[in-house]
Amino acid sequence: CVSPPSPPKVLLTTYMAARRGLGRITAACEAGVTRLTRVAHRAPCRLLPMADGAAAAAGAGAAHCAIGGYGGGLLGGDVVELEVEVEAGAALLLTTQASTKVYRTKRDGIAATQSLNATVDDGGLLVLAPDPVVPYESAAYEQRQRFMLSPAASLVAVDWVGAGRVSRGERWAFSHFASRNEVLRRPEAGAAPAKAVAVDAMRLSGGAGLLGLDLGRVEYDTVVSVLCSGEEAAPVAERLRMLSSALAHRRGGQRAGG
């Protein structure tokens, strides 16, 4: 009697597939108060309407929504796409639950990517004020944000990146970080195409000393851009100009003093 041959051994390897997250938000003005009329998301994106934690926003008649996620951060290959609509007269504050952590890339080296497309109608205001993106060592992250504004719409958008887990000795140790922000404004009338009023692009490579920028012998832990456009954003822009001038004066005095 001959025993049947043993079946061949099969080695099974499990890979974590890249995740594709989606988020949709619509804010509309009803009787002078902004309400979120649409909130939809799919992991790894998560949207959290904030009913009690935004007294300042509520006092101004604005709605507040926080952008979060599942699993604590983004993995290499993750894709998150956000669509935001602020209707006429509405005001929307978008924040994040915490910093957006980006983990090291997998063997394929594919970056985590995130995009945001926002439209703001006349009389509307969008304030995007997230915590910073924090890429960990060997992480790669790419981001693109596009804001389409009607003639009387306003925007304040903050875009910033942290150096990494500085407390663990990671300072600009990620593979690369890229971010591009585009602000376009529709014409007053007619079918003319929208015009770009501001384009801000940033690309950083880890370990490159922040592209050789002269930082006055100070090790900075963040790089930040703030875009302001429209009548409602004018007071913020003026305060930022005053702050920038004060910091430049202070820095000049420190250099002069050695």
Image: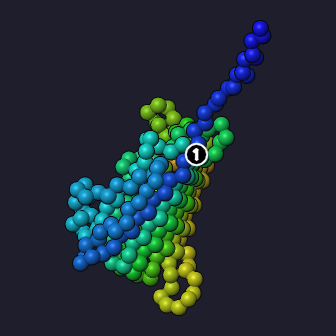
Counting from the top left corner in percent of width and height, residue 246 is at 38, 59
Counting from the top left corner in percent of width and height, residue 8 is at 73, 22
- The residue at which mark 1 appears reads as 18
| Farthest-out residue, top | 1
Counting from the top left corner in percent of width and height, residue 90 is at 33, 74
What residue appears at the point 46 percent right and 36 percent down from the top-left corner? 166
Figure colour scheme = rainbow
Q: The residue tagged with tag 1: helix, strand or loop?
A: loop
User: Viewer-proximal residue, 33 or 1?
Assistant: 1
Instruction: Name the side, left or right, on which 68 lies relative to 29.
Output: right
Q: Quadrant of residue 40?
A: bottom left
Image: 171 above or below 19: above
Counting from the top left corner in percent of width and height, residue 147 is at 49, 69
Image: 56 above or below 34: above
Q: Is residue 4 visible?
A: yes
| Farthest-out residue, front | 1
Q: Quadrant of residue 244?
A: bottom left
What residue appears at the point 76 percent right and 17 percent down from the top-left corner? 5
Neighbours of disc 1 within 10 Å: few (<14), some (14-19), many (20+): some
Q: Quadrant of residue 144?
A: bottom right
What residue appears at the point 25 percent right and 58 percent down from the top-left corner? 51
Tag 1: residue type? Ala
| Farthest-out residue, bottom | 190
The quadrant in which the N terminus is found is top right
